[in-house]
Amino acid sequence: MPAEMSPRERVLTAMRREKPDRVPREWSFTPAVQEEFVRQTGSTNAAEYFGFERRGVGFRGPETLPDFSRWFPGGIPENATLGEYGTGSVPAGFYHFTGKIYPLEHTDTVEELEEYPWPDFTPIERHEHLEQHVADLHAAEWFVSGSVGHIWETAWQMPRMEKLMEAMVLDPPYAAHIFDRITENQAFAAKRFAQAGCDMIHCGDDIGMQDRLMMSPKMWREWLKPRWRHVIKSAKDENPDLLAWYHSDGDVREVIEDLIEIGFDILNPVQPECMDPAALKRQYGDRIGFWGCIGTQTTMPFGTPDDVREAVKWTVANVGYDGGLLIAPTHVLEPDVSWENIMALHEAVEEYGVYQD
């Protein structure tokens, strides 16, 4: 058995596709499940309670948001919460889920986009704390990541998805302006996380549906691949050893080779309902690590504790051999996941996740 590793060593070793002492793990809860976790354990911190190895750092928010009222001709609902890109969330009446309101829904020209109050990540007060925060977490031997965010998802949530997709075909300058403003922000964030000493940057976009991409691979390669290449290069020019993590739900097999080509080291969440994790390991496991693999459409909500344990055992054997795996559910755990299944997940990783020499 390999010698016991620190949390940081364990994740770095696994995500560099080498064999750690044991499989690292991580999961997160929706508000209702967090409340159940507190009731069951008396703890409020799942990362500490279950022994997760990763900790995160991030930019501070802006001191104030601009006045977005001009961009909502019908008015901003009183119950809306606006983000710094101006996209609004409104309660949707079902657990924690929200609806969206779109600040660019009524824009049609590049000139309007040039007048829009785009966020600015560069003020020093937003990121001057990063070096010290990373250093403090490293001193405690945690693996540290910074979340760069999205390009596609942030972009379509401004004018609506269908409006942006139409523009990608019929009005490329309009679509490009939105993508480029977001990309430059994400590239700056990626660079600063690298400079601050993070071990990994989180990036990603939900471009996958259950059995295909949302757009053709050709369109993805035209619009998103070069922009993500720029983001990753901005970080790895500062630190070539930095790990880059890409998230997309669904079936993204058609662009995995592209993701590897532009510098991504880790694929998340690897939904087993959409892609065969064992097949991906055989095809790509020497070039990319896998973070996830435990189904939240099937096993976690609808399986028994024995099903959960079997899924963990199978995943470690078929995806985690020789390293390259951080085991996790493929999404945040929803209220239909029982506490028994959550504990079965934890206990199974403890039992089956130990590597032997």
Image (spheres, rainbow, N blue to C red):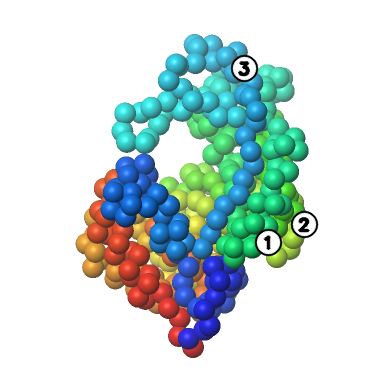
The answer to which of marks 2 and 3 sits earlier in the sequence is 3
Please, is residue 62 above or below residue 258 in the view?
A: above
Left or right of 98, for residue 258 = right
Where is mark 2, residue-wise?
238
Q: Label 1 crowding class (10 Å Cα cut-off): few <14, some 14-19, many 20+?
A: many
Q: Earlier in the sequence, mark 3 or mark 1?
A: 3
Q: Secondary structure at mark 3?
A: loop
How crowded is the residue under tag 2: few (<14 C-alpha within 10 Å), some, or many (20+)? some
Q: Please give the name of the residue rendered at 55% of the width and 56% of the height, measured from the top-left corner.
A: 55
Give the number of callouts.
3
Dot 2 amino acid type: Glu
Q: Which residue is mark 3?
A: 67
Q: CA distance from mark 3 to mark 1?
A: 37 Å
Where is residue 290? Give x, y as percent: 50, 65
* Residue 262 visible within the image: no
Extreme right residue here? 237
Front residue of 215/95: it is 95
